[in-house]
Image (cartoon, helix red, strand yellow):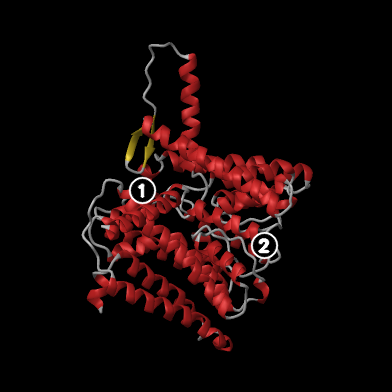
């Protein structure tokens, strides 16, 4: 059986991995034995998934990579990645349904929000058993790391690289992908331990500390408390949360440099410097209306602004207050941060800081070119983890193409929500920006009574946001192409 699994197709391994992850929340039952009644709600979906996974492993052995005329590396990897995420959404919803906690559509919404690290919720957190609270946070923790990082440890051959790229990873920390995956996993686990200890030191209970750390590192935002981090009213806990959210919003490769104490190389990276500058500038901009219109003191306005800026641009969605009561200027800044998002290669969503930085640089260079002598030649560049990189035509096309596509999806999703939710354009923009950017901050539009059409639009937005749009489109295209080739072969 071991040989069947090791030599099976990627799909079989992904199904088995998801089955294992769904069963994992049962580890909390020894600490909450009164919740033993919910054991079947997790074991039954896990068992069904395991059986399906074993069948797929036996019937679909791993085939040698063969290039085709229509398949690129990204196309080969996008379909398994899209399958893994969509399958996990369905299986992650089943425990809620089997236990009678949520209807199927609400359970599916909660699952999609969890795996995509969004954090929008339709559940009553105050009445939810501990095992389901852990399940929500654990989905986010695993969704932040990504299924492919784990699977790469079991995959041999060229397909591992196509899968790695398809899930949105760009940097290698080690010479081999397996070692890179292990480095990612070790970093993620190490920060989980440190975050949990920090929360415990400042008075948070162990269960809450583990759940909040998982959600903060994955820039997700599911909380075990109805009032999120604001429930604790503790500045040290807020500071720990800000640090964890910043870690989650930072490129894993940059974090690896930090752990290796290569600070000089780390602070050369343009995206990191842009992130730190953005946090500083937007915090100051948010403080001004809070002090003027809400009459807050300097210390209170600084902490609320800093937390609001970091939780928004990191696309975490934790809160210490109701951001919808902020002055309009502050709400506008929050919406802009939702769209920008965190770093490339992090657990955050949005356009990503690197693309926002490049957009500014491209615009600046375009203006300079128009006012400079015709003969003047410039070679703009920026610093990545790998070193100095020229801003060439390929980078410009990729950046502008993605941002244009992001804007198109954002406008379409916003307009559809105005129809299904019968709300104002501003409210729809705010809510879809939150879903599409995998932020999770709601203006009250998303709840258990929300129209199913609105929930479906938001779920589609979450998936597109987590997998950065093109992977979903390419995955769907590859699926249709694969079916077409299959039917052609059968017709011969």
Residue 230 image point, x, y percent: 67, 62
Closer to viewer: mark 2 or mark 1: 1
Dot label at residue 230: 2
| Quadrant in the picture for residue 46 | bottom left
Residue position marked by numbered label 1 in the rendering: 170
For residue 323, side relative to residue 173 (left or right): right
Residue 491 image point, x, y percent: 29, 58
Q: Which of 288 and 80 is in front in this view?
A: 80
Q: Which of 473 and 168 is in front in this view?
A: 473
Mark 1, residues whose alpha carbon is within 10 Å: few (<14), some, or many (≥20)? few
For residue 459, side relative to residue 252 (left or right): right
Q: Which of 24 and 484 is in front in this view?
A: 484
Spatial separation of the CA atoms under disc 2 and disc 1? 35 Å
Q: Can residue 237 be seen in this view?
A: yes
Mark 2, residues whose alpha carbon is within 10 Å: few (<14), some, or many (≥20)? some
Secondary structure found at label 1: loop
Residue 56 image point, x, y percent: 33, 72
| Quadrant in the picture for residue 131 | bottom right
Labels 2 and 1 touching (C-beta < 8 A): no
Q: In which quarter of the image is the C terminus?
A: bottom left
Residue under the point 49% across and 26% down: 364
């Amino acid at each position: 059986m071991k040989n069947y699994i090791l030599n099976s197709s990627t799909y079989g391994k992904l199904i088995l991995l998801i089955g294992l992850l769904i069963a994992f929340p049962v580890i909390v039952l020894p600490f909450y034995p009164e919740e033993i009644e919910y054991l079947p709600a997790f074991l039954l979906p896990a068992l069904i998934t395991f059986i399906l996974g074993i069948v797929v492993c036996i019937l679909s052995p791993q085939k040698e990579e063969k290039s085709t005329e229509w398949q690129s590396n990204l196309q080969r990897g996008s379909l398994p990645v899209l399958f893994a995420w969509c399958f996990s959404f369905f299986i992650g919803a089943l425990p809620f349904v089997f236990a009678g906690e949520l209807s199927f559509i609400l359970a599916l919404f909660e699952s999609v929000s969890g795996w995509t690290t969004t954090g929008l919720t339709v559940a009553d957190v105050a009445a939810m058993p501990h095992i389901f609270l852990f399940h929500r946070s654990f989905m986010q923790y695993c969704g932040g790391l990504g299924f492919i990082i784990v699977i790469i440890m079991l995959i041999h051959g060229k397909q591992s690289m196509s899968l790695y790229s398809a899930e949105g990873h760009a940097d290698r920390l080690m010479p081999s992908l397996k070692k890179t995956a292990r480095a990612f996993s070790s970093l993620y686990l190490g920060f989980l331990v440190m975050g949990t200890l920090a929360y415990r030191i400042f008075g948070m209970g162990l269960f809450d500390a583990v759940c909040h750390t998982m959600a903060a590192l994955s820039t997700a935002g599911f909380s075990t408390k109805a009032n999120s981090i604001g429930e604790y009213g503790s500045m040290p806990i807020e500071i720990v949360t800000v640090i964890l959210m910043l870690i989650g919003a930072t490129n894993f490769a940059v974090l690896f440099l930090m752990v290796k104490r290569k600070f000089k190389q780390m602070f050369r990276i343009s995206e990191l410097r842009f992130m730190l500058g953005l946090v500083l500038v937007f915090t100051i901009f948010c403080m001004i209306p809070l002090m003027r219109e809400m009459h807050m003191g300097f210390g209170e306005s600084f902490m609320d602004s800093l937390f609001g800026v970091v939780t928004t641009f990191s696309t975490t969605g934790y809160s210490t207050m109701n951001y919808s009561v902020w002055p309009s200027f502050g709400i506008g800044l929050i919406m802009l941060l939702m769209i920008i998002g965190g770093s490339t290669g992090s657990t955050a969503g949005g356009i990503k800081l690197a693309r926002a930085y490049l957009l500014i640089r491209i615009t600046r260079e375009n203006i300079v070119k128009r006012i400079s002598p015709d003969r003047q030649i410039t070679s703009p560049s920026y610093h990545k983890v790998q070193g100095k990189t020229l801003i060439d035509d390929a980078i410009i096309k990729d950046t502008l193409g993605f941002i244009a596509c992001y804007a198109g999806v954002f406008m379409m999703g916003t307009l559809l929500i105005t129809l299904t939710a019968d709300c104002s354009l501003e409210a729809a923009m705010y809510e879809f920006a939150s879903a599409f950017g995998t932020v999770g901050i709601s203006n009250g539009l998303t709840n258990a009574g929300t129209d199913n059409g609105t929930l479906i639009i938001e779920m589609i937005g979450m998936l597109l946001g987590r997998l950065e749009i093109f992977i979903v489109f390419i995955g769907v295209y590859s699926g249709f192409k694969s079916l077409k080739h299959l039917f052609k072969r059968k017709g011969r």
